[in-house]
Image (cartoon, rainbow, N blue to C red):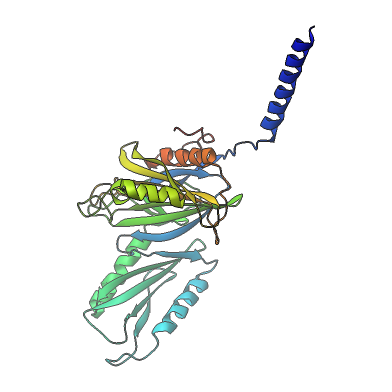
Amino acid sequence: MTPRLFVLISLAFVAAIGFAFGVRRRPPMVEMRMITVPVGRFLIDIPEEATISWGRQGYEEPGSFIQTFEAPTPNLVKEAMEYDAKKYRKPHIDGGSQLESIVDGHIPNCWFMFFWDSELVKDNYIEVKGYFWKGGQGFVFRNNAVFTPQGMRERADLLERYFLMVQMRSPQEIPTEPGFCFKNAYFQGGPKPDPTENIAMHVNLPSHPDVCVRFCTDVEYSASQTNPKLLDRTALTLAEDAVNRLSGIRRLRARDRTVGPYHGQELLERIREYNGTVGYSFMWECLGRPKSATHPNLMLEMMTGYGEPPVASSLNRKEAMALWDAMVDSIRYRIPEPPPPAMSPPKAPTP
């Protein structure tokens, strides 16, 4: 072997070893096993380790802000009502108290509180909260009633009928019948002719505490001339785009994206924060159709690097986009059937 050939072989061998060690030192791509969870009338796949919390929960007559909380015994629900009542046990300018009355319902473990929101005005409608207990869970519905004995009783009876539609479920249980799913429960039945439904689910990942996900469905906020699409709302001029790039914001995707029958748009951005950390902000939205429970406004958001102050994203760009694509592509209307199997781990993202 000539000296020249020996040197070339030696250099190639050293380079191969260096490449191999470099590959080994590179951290493996994070892969997450996914599970399917119900949200309102929809399904979405999220990481199996996720912890779920619920934001706004609204359904028909029970109101736009249904409250749910753990209550091992019915007495805890009644105590919660008494605690709320303290806020209204004060004089009203028109006489009497802001708290008009507390009455028992016709069904077990059910109470109603009638009250005035303001100490300054009493008009034809009074506020009503219904407190219910079932299966270790407390529920609070809120609406208003005509301020007459008959009007108040009719409203209480209506809220009771809605509560009788409530069926309990475990946090990840997917019902096999039509219904609107919310925290640990669901309202039986298909959509009403003129539906009022909204819900927001929040997801956090214990192994990636800087990652936040939110999925919302809302029949009220639907397609109209006054609700421009996502990319119209976030459109940039060339000058604005240049400023964004200088300030550390880079658009990775800004495009139409259809998921099944839902024609939406997505915006994915890489953000360099003021402290030098890098995170990602992703959003997909389908405006939907007016007053349609099967085609409501749908919105999915994901943020990485979340913290105070901002922190470096625990997911790199490829990992963040793979998780994002897996969640977006899994959004579908829940047709009553046996729960589908969990999806496989996210694949590599498309450019």
The C terminus lies in quadrant = top left
> Residue at point 52% right, 55% down?
306
Q: x, y percentage for residue 323?
A: 50, 41
Q: Nearer the viewer, residue 321 or 5?
A: 5
Q: Is residue 330 above or below residue 104?
A: above
Q: Nearer the viewer, residue 34 or 72?
A: 34
Q: Quadrant of residue 257?
A: top left
Q: Nearer the viewer, residue 318 or 190?
A: 318
Q: Residue at (31%, 83%) from the top-left corner?
A: 118
* Residue found at x 22% / y 52%: 193
- Left or right, 236 with respect to 111, comes to left
Q: In the rendering, at what x and y percent does residue 218 appear?
A: 32, 54
Q: Position of residue 158 (x, y in %)?
A: 29, 66
- Residue extending farthest to the left is 225
Whether residue 114 appears in this view of the structure is: yes
Q: Quarter of the image containing the N terminus?
A: top right
Q: Position of residue 252 (x, y in %)?
A: 43, 41
Q: Which of 265/179 is in front?
A: 265
* For residue 132, side relative to residue 157 (left or right): right
Q: Is any part of residue 39 visible from this angle?
A: no
Picture layout, residue 44 above or below residue 157 = above
Q: From this viewpoint, which residue is outermost toward the top?
A: 1
